[in-house]
Amino acid sequence: MQQADWYFDFISPYAYLGLVRLGELPPEVAICYRPVLFAGLLNHWEQKGPAEIPPKRAWTYRSCTWWAARQGIPFRLPAAHPFNSLPYLRLAIAAGCSTAAVRRIFDALWTTGADPADARLVAELARSLAIDPAELSRQEVKDALRSATDRAIARGVFGVPTLAVGDELFWGADSTDFVKDYLVDPGILGSTEMQRLTTLPVGVSRIPG
């Protein structure tokens, strides 16, 4: 059995689509679900999220809706996006990050059109997972999410979803085929051209401002 760590935040439609595509991986790959705060990744790497750039926001929603329909994946944008994903990330942690819990939360957010800001949704999800909603306010749960995000950053994770297989990181819902090929032949990342890319010089740097 080979373990792979899947880093995600419920705020990301790509993470939802990536979750569904995890089912394409070989059964001998054991997925360990790693909730992280996407905003924390963005702040560390000094990036903007797709929803923070108006034209990219519109493209993201259209693209994900099209892609889901093409793949036959149930999908509906929540009532508002972006939204505060902290309660849902903490709920996943309180529920032990089990496959069932992670999938139930994603489904509630990305297939129903519900309002993520509705406290009743969080409470209903918590109860359905046999979790007392008060657990989400425990300092231990908050600290666990913060530590998980810090560990992800230290590992080089810069976006969600990201699947880590050994020392290799595969970013994006569209990296599933790349992962499948790598699992069959890890040597694809050891080719001369792949090695050249790791030390490719920077030709010019954009000056901020």
Image (spheres, grey):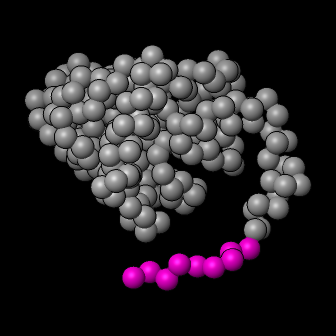
**Would residue 121 be found to the left or right of residue 163 on screen?**
left
Residue 58 shows in this picture: yes
**Would residue 176 be found to the left or right of residue 151 on screen?**
right
Nearest the camera: 68 or 86?
68
**Would residue 72 be found to the left or right of residue 201 on screen?**
left
| Residue 176 spot, x, y in % from top left | 61, 33
Q: Residue furthest right?
A: 192
Q: What residue do we see at 69% from left, 24% from top? A: 1
Up-down relation of residue 46 to residue 102 (above or below): below
> In which quarter of the view is residue 4 placed?
top right
Nearest the camera: 52 or 168?
52
Q: Quadrant of the C terminus?
A: bottom left
Residue 146 shows in this picture: no
Nearest the camera: 16 or 77?
77
97 inside magenta stretch: no
207 inside magenta stretch: yes
Up-down relation of residue 94 to residue 37 (above or below): above
Q: What residue do we see at 69% from left, 77% from top? A: 203
Report the predominant secondary structure element of the magenta stretch: loop
**Would residue 32 be found to the left or right of residue 111 on screen?**
right
Q: What residue do we see at 43% from left, 25% from top? A: 68
Q: What residue do we see at 57% from left, 45% from top? A: 171
Tally the numbered discs.
Answer: 0
The residue stretch that appears in magenta:
201-209
| Residue 97 spot, x, y in % from top left | 41, 32
